[in-house]
Amino acid sequence: MKLTEKQKLRKRLKSFCGMMGDELNNLDADLVSRLTETIHRLGTPAKVAIAGLSASQHRAVGELFIGERLFASADEAKSCPVIEVRFGKEAKTEAIFGDTLKSYPGISLSVALAGKKPSAIRIQLPYPILADIDFTILPAYDGDDNRAGYLVNLLDNTEVIVWCSDATNQWSPQERRLWFTVPDTLKEHSVLALTNAELLTTDEATTALEQKLEFVSGEFHTSAKVNVEQAKTTVHSGTVLDNDQFVSSGAMSLMKHVIALVQIGQGDLLAQAKAVRAEIDTIPIGALQDAPSVPLSAAGPTLAVAAKPASQLSPEAHAKNIILNGAKRCQAAVKNCEPNNYSPMFDPLNEVLSSLSKVIANDLNLTRDHDLMKRQITEASELIGLLSYENNENAANEATDIFRQITMDTWLRLPSKSVSGTRNLTEIEKVSFSN
C-alpha cells in the first residue's frame, strides 16, 4: 500500500532520529522538541472533541458522528465519563481505571459502567472516518465548579471542538465563562452545533437564534443547525442510509464543517513537518569520521577478496566483499538512471545494506558501536526505501549520500588493521542527475 504524505514524513523524521542515535542529544533543544512533537502528531489521528451543556444533546451528536447508539438510557449517558472513540479492527469497549484497563467485546457501555465507575471509556470501531479522526465525547458541563478539570479534557491535544448548544436557548453564562478561557487559536477551529433545530418553528424563536449567533460572533469558525434525532435515524455503522434526510437534518452541513477544519489542521501539520524536515536535511546523519581520500582504483589488490565464495570467507572478509562489490554495483546503477526516472538505483542500494545487516547481525563483531551500527543500517535501509517513493533527483542524491555515509561508517569499524588505502571504496562519486 502506498504511503500517505503524513506517513512518509513521519517515517523520514523517525529514520533521522534512529540514524542520529545518541547524537540527537547534541542538537538544538528547540529543534529536538519540535521534531518529537511533529513525529507524535503525524502518527496520531486528528482529535475532535464534542461537548456541551446537559440540554445540548452533545452525546447524541457524538452518536451521530460515529453512526452507533452508545447509550441505552438517559441515566447511562448522564453517568458516563469521558468517551474516547478510536479506530480498531473490531468493535471493542475498554473501561479505564487509572493504570488498569478492562476490555469487553462490542459496544458494551452498560457492562463497562457496572460496579466501580471508570475514569474514562475507550471504544474501538472499524469505521473509515475513525482512521483519520479520533472523537472524544465529554460529559455534560453545567457550571463553574469543574471548569478547570473540564478544560483539561476539552483542550488536551484537541484540533477541532464541536460545541453543542440548544438553538432555542440564549447563550448561557456557563457557556460564556467556559468559552472565555478557550484559546483563540482553537476557537478558530471550532463549530457551534445548534441542536433542537426542529423546534425553531416561530418567528420569535428564529429571532432569538439570530441574536444568539450575533452575540457569539467571532467565538467560532462557523455554526450549523441540526435536527439530531432525525439525523441519527439515517446513519448506522458509520454509513449514511438516507442521504436526502441526512442533508435535510443539517447533519451533512455540520459534518462538512468539521471535516473541513480537520483538513485545515492537517494542512498546517504537514507544513510544519516539511519545515522540520528541511531543517534536519542540512544535518549530517550518522557518526561520520574523517578518512583518507584515495581513488577507487588505488585499492585494486583488495578486490581479490571477491574471488572466493562468500561461504569460504571470514565474516570480516565477507563484509568487505559486500561493501567493495556493492559500491561498484551501485555506481553502475546510478549511471543507468535516466532523467526523471531514478528507480533503478534504489533496490541495489538496499540490497547491499540488507546483506551487510545480515553479516553484522549473525557473524561479525565490529570494533565499536556494534548495536548502534546495526540500528543505523536498518534505519538507512528504511529511509532509502522511503526515498524511492519520491523518485526524484533530490531523493536520489540523498539516497546515495546515506548509502555512502553508512557503508563508510561500517568500513571504519571492521576488525582489521589493514584497511588503509581502501576506506574510501564505499564512496560513490557525487552524481549530478540533472546532467
Image (cartoon, helix red, strand yellow):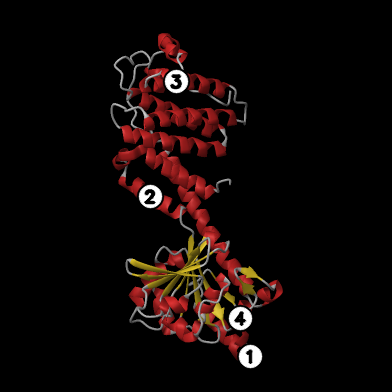
Query: Where does the image place residue 194, in percent across and percent down from the top left?
Result: 55, 79
Task: Tell me the CA gap for discs 2 and 3.
Answer: 42 Å
Q: Answer yes or no: is residue 427 visible.
A: no
Few, some or many residues within 10 Å of mark 2 (<14, 14–19, 20+): some
Say what secondary structure mark 4 lies in: loop
Compare marks 3 and 4 and give the one earlier in the sequence. Answer: 4
Which mark, residue 96?
none
Residue linked to disc 4: 227
Task: Mark 2 vs mark 1: give the one in front.
Answer: 2
Q: Are marks 2 and 4 in contact (CB under 8 Å)?
A: no
Task: Tell me the CA gap for discs 2 and 4.
Answer: 42 Å
Q: Residue 285's image quarter?
A: top left
Q: Quadrant of the C terminus?
A: top right
Which mark, residue 310?
3
Which mark, residue 36?
2
Residue linked to disc 1: 202
